[in-house]
């Protein structure tokens, strides 16, 4: 067990990550997407695929949009007198049981010209009694909205409307009475589908209709409509969908028929909560809606999964124009549930669903109505979260403990059995129990644990130490390689983001030096100054990134973490200068030129890992913080500074070193100014004279940035008397002269902009 401890711990971490997703502490989009795919696959696998003769769709299709001469009714919207004729035909001529509209009638119908006649009566025929009499006689025939409303009156007609979720959603028409009033779910944190606006029907139409319901589907993150909100919240009240409204009217008609009464009493919608004590202890999830004898299961968002019967065409389609024009067989509609909708692309009621990427919205309502009546809507109650957590825990722990004990062949066999058991039991519950249990998370967990176990056995245990030595031996000191080899699983060359410190050093005037030496002599010189400088970096546990001719790039904080990476980098830079000073007598004895270097250091978040091309990779660092360090090295010669560090490096080491603020600069490629500093020495080791001079310098910088040029110049002259060779003091004296002649302006931030690298 101890041998496999790392593998088991990693496996348990993977299990916990999956459990965190299942518990909704965070979401992993990949699992959500795979879960949607798994649901769609189960749905398509188990759909009956048989037509439902109880429901007929009257389709506003392409044929219906043709002209009258071609057998259609013309462009949509049609005059309401034609819709009124449809209502008459559906009930009187064809004997349908109920009629639902998957369209909205939000605007008054003025196609009859009645409005124009009324205006003429007010303007041109105000005193013409015969005109007024004729208009009064014609008005009932020309008021198409009133005609439509009269045809719906005392008939089982259900209207449709839509909700808009946007913050600036418009409001039009009149909503029906809510199915549940505000305050119904007070104290319960249920994430309903919430609307900010709506497009509903004209008041006189709503008053005449038996009921109305919204036709909003619930669109998942992948753009697919799998569910419909059974309760949509607007201004605290709750509204039913078109499908539920149709079912309620049907149930009311059935009860009225039993009582042999003409009055229809609609059944109430009653929220359903679990009564079993195991679920009610601290659990307030809404699991179903009770509507008369029917129970409609809902999920945690109070939406119902659409029980698709099959592809488009699971219900009989009739052209709306043929219904209006009386061209169909009455047997096609007698006693049927009739839904009016559209499949014409230009009317924008086509949805993406699990069974087809282009699917009529009206058929979604038809499937839901059939599912409610048959009581076969799939259940996905909120408590399935607990079932998923238990499944992941049991399966994950069993796989984590079992796989390390098996051979690779037996691991594959055990994994196959686990996958088969999870898939088989899940599909059985889906088909037989109408219960939708999560599937993708369990399958993915099993595959991840199997893949990790196989990879761990092959790569980590067999090759771990050799890989660490081979990968990092060229970058880090041997003692660090040995330290890393003790726990090779903790290190890799995969790119990652870390806070680190990077160092660049470069020889001043190297071109001149190289031109004065023979190639072999130059090679010896390079080896004899790069070797001791590399040893200094190694002594401070640094990682050599690369040699660039006479330059060195190194970093701290990877592959081994280094809490004091900034301090180690500065110590390395100071020691590099001391080492060069020790080498000068030896170089002079060989008639070699004196070597001086500039060092730039910066700390920040950077990417570290194997980077490059397919041809060649290198373990290196990249990022803005790295670029800034390179720029700082380049400007050391401008200030005569041996080492320049960025502000982030100085902040991390302010208690360890004495710093001189060099300047505020905008380096090439940067818009924001950065403060740069020179480390003078270790705190407690810097002499008093240097500290006093540093105080005077700080005062001079304050005067300079306050644009007090005279006092700044005086202070700088005094400093130059103390240190006549200081390039920094001379630089600021030159700037004072320039700014005195040409002021930088009141909004000057004290920063100097470098146009070169």
Image (tube, rainbow, N blue to C red):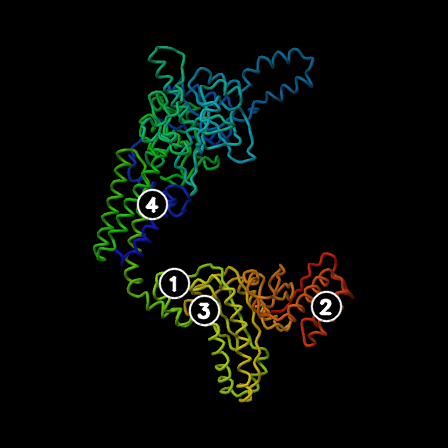
Q: State how far apart marks 2 and 3 are (Cα).
A: 40 Å
Give residue 392's position: percent from left, percent from top: 31, 44
Image quadrant where residue 705 sits: bottom right
Residue 698 as seen in the image, left or right of residue 398: right
In the image, is 385 to the left or to the right of 190?
A: left
Under circle 3, the secondary element is loop
Q: Secondary structure at mark 4?
A: helix
**Front one among 450 and 472:** 472
Look at the picture and state if 143 lies above or below 480. Answer: above
Spatial CA distance of label 4 from label 3 is: 43 Å
Q: Residues within 10 Å of mark 4 (few under 14, many from 20)?
A: many
Residue 360: quarter of image: top left
Name the residue carrying label 4. 441
* Rendered view: 97 above or below 454: above
Q: Nearer the viewer, residue 95 or 592?
A: 592
Q: CA distance from mark 1 to mark 2?
A: 49 Å
Give the residue at x 66% y 11%. 129
Give whichever of discs 1 and 4 has the lower sequence position: 4
């Amino acid at each position: 067990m101890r041998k496999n401890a790392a593998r088991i711990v990693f496996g348990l971490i993977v299990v916990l990550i999956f459990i965190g997703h299942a518990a909704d502490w965070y979401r992993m989009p990949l699992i959500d997407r795979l879960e949607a795919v798994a649901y769609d696959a189960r749905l398509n696998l188990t759909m009956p695929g048989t037509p439902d003769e109880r429901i007929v769709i009257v389709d506003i299709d392409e044929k219906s949009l043709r002209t009258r001469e071609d057998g259609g009714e013309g462009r949509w919207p049609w005059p309401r007198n034609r819709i009124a004729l449809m209502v008459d035909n559906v009930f009187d001529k064809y004997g349908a049981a109920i009629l639902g509209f998957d369209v909205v009638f939000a605007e008054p119908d003025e196609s009859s010209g009645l409005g124009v006649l009324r205006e003429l009566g007010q303007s041109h025929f105000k005193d013409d009694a015969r005109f007024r009499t004729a208009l009064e006689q014609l008005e009932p025939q020309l008021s198409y909205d009133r005609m439509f409303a009269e045809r719906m009156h005392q008939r089982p007609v259900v209207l449709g409307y839509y909700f808009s979720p946007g913050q600036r959603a418009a409001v039009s028409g009149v909503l029906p009475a809510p199915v549940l009033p505000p305050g119904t779910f007070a104290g319960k944190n249920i994430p309903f589908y919430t609307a900010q606006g709506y497009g509903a029907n004209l008041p006189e139409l709503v008053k005449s209709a038996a009921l109305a319901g919204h036709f909003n589907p619930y669109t998942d993150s992948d753009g697919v409509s799998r569910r419909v909100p059974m309760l949509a919240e607007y201004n605290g009240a709750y509204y039913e969908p078109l499908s539920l409204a149709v079912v309620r009217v049907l149930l009311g008609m059935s009860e009225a028929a039993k009582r042999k009464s003409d009055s229809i009493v609609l059944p109430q919608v009653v929220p359903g909560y679990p009564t079993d004590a195991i679920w009610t202890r601290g659990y307030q999830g809404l699991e179903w809606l009770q509507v008369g004898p029917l129970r409609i299961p809902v999920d945690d968002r109070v939406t119902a999964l659409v029980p698709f019967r099959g592809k488009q065409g699971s219900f009989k389609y009739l052209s709306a124009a043929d219904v209006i024009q009386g061209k169909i067989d009455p047997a096609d509609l007698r006693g049927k549930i009739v839904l009016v909708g559209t499949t014409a692309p230009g009317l924008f009621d086509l949805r993406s669903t699990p069974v087809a990427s282009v699917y009529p919205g009206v058929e979604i309502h038809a499937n839901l109505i059939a599912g409610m009546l048959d009581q076969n809507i799939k259940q996905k109650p909120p408590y399935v979260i607990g079932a998923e957590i238990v499944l992941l825990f049991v399966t994950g722990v069993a796989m984590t403990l079992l796989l390390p004990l098996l051979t690779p062949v037996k691991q594959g066999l055990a994994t196959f059995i686990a996958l088969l058991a999870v898939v088989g039991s899940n599909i059985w519950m889906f088909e037989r129990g109408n219960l939708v249990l999560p599937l993708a998370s369990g399958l993915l967990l099993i595959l991840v644990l199997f893949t990790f176990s196989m990879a761990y056995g092959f790569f980590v245990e067999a090759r771990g130490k050799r890989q660490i030595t081979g990968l990092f031996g060229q970058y880090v000191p041997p003692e660090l390689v040995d330290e890393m080899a003790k726990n090779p699983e903790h290190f890799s060359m995969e790119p990652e983001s870390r806070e680190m410190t990077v160092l660049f050093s470069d020889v001043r005037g190297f071109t001149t030096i190289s031109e004065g030496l023979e190639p072999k002599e130059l090679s010896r010189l390079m080896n004899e100054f790069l070797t001791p400088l590399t040893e200094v970096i190694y002594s401070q546990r640094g990682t050599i990134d690369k040699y660039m001719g006479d330059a060195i790039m190194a970093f701290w904080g990877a592959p081994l973490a280094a809490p004091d990476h900034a301090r180690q980098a500065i110590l390395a830079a100071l020691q590099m200068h001391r080492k060069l000073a020790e080498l000068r007598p030896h170089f002079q004895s060989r008639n070699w030129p004196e070597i001086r270097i500039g060092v730039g250091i910066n700390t920040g978040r950077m990417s570290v890992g194997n980077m490059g091309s397919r041809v060649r990779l290198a373990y290196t660092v990249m990022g803005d913080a790295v670029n800034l360090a390179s720029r700082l090295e380049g400007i050391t010669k401008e200030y005569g500074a041996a080492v320049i560090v960025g502000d982030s490096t100085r902040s991390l080491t302010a208690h360890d070193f004495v710093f001189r603020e060099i300047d505020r600069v905008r380096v090439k490629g940067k818009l924001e100014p950065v403060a740069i500093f020179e480390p003078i020495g270790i705190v407690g080791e810097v002499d008093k004279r240097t500290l006093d001079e540093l105080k005077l310098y700080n005062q001079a910088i304050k005067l300079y940035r306050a644009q007090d040029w005279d006092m700044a110049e005086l202070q700088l002259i005094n400093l130059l008397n103390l240190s006549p060779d200081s390039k920094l003091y001379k630089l600021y004296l030159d700037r004072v002269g320039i700014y005195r002649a040409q002021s930088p302006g009141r909004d000057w931030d004290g920063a100097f902009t470098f146009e070169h690298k």
